[in-house]
Image: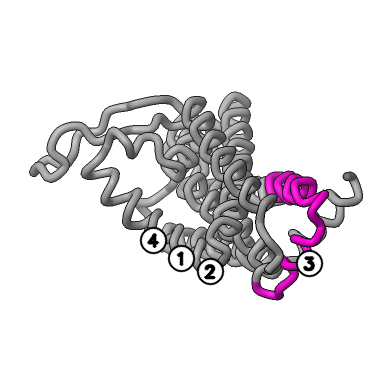
Amino acid sequence: MIRLLTAETKRLLARRMTRYFPLGLAGLIIGGFVIAYLVITNDDGNSPDFVFDLVGGPSGRDALGPMPTLLPVMGFVIGASYIGADLKTGMIEQLLTWEPRRLRLLGARTVASIAGVAVIAVALGVLWVACAYGLAATAGTTDGATGELWANIATMTLRAGLAAGLFAVFGLAITLLVNSSVGSIVGFVIYWFIIENIVISVFVPKIAVYLPVTNASSFGSGNDVQRISGNAFSEDGPDLISHHGYLMAGAVLVGWTLLALVVAAGVFDRRDVA
């Protein structure tokens, strides 16, 4: 099993999507902070405070910015591409002939996906925080960055990495079910942008609090999952109330991942070669 885990981890890391997606995201992070630095240095009245302007206060609740949402999306795409490569090249037919060990193979890919994507996601989270700190250090102030703040940021980064790893498994499982990496990725993007963020969140808020991306973002950021209360189209905007905390959000995320993986494993274990 160790050899299989090692081989599958190498296969995951050798995928172009595994390399280029994180590198592209890293480039956007660095480029965004460089632009922010140039704008700030040309504005004498703007001096960012690391604690209160960039990480959301002493708790560091906003330290990762949009990363708690973007990292799970990255994980889904990498996980879908991981199994999608076999579908595209026809190698899936060879895997299906390995009937006694199909679930071992899927188990190895599950572990490799969680571990590999989590490490990449943590590295991107560290990069985001490092850029924010560098921006404040060169164009503002880093006063007030206590050990407790850094501990909160560290645990937040680890949770965001785990959420991305779980979403990689989610993407792998969905791709096995729909038998197409392109279909699963396009369907997921449509679901994320339109169905979860707009349709369900606005019209069925009681269900929206249990959806995967919402809970992945909450688990990574440490913020509560909120739902719309009252009229979402009122002049003053929708009222938001807390529904559950980030630990419950993590449990919901694990539940979605296990559900998708169990169904995919059942389908994969019984699938015919033809």
What amino acid type is highlighted by mark number 1?
Answer: Val
Instruction: Provide the residue span drawn in magenta.
Output: 88-114
Precedes in sequence: disc 3 or disc 4: 3
Q: Position of residue 151 (x, y in %)?
A: 62, 28
Residue identified by numbered label 3: 94
Precedes in sequence: disc 2 or disc 3: 3
Q: Residue at x 44, y 61 (%)?
A: 187
Q: Position of residue 188 (x, y in %)?
A: 45, 58
What amino acid type is highlighted by mark number 2?
Answer: Val
Residue identified by numbered label 1: 186
Quadrant where the N terminus lies? top right
Alpha carbon distance from label 2 to label 3: 21 Å
**Relative vertical location of residue 130 with respect to residue 150 in this rendering, above or below:** below
Q: Between 244 and 45, which is closer to the camera in this rendering? A: 244
Q: Secondary structure at mark 4?
A: helix
Precedes in sequence: disc 3 or disc 1: 3
Res. 58 visible in picture? no
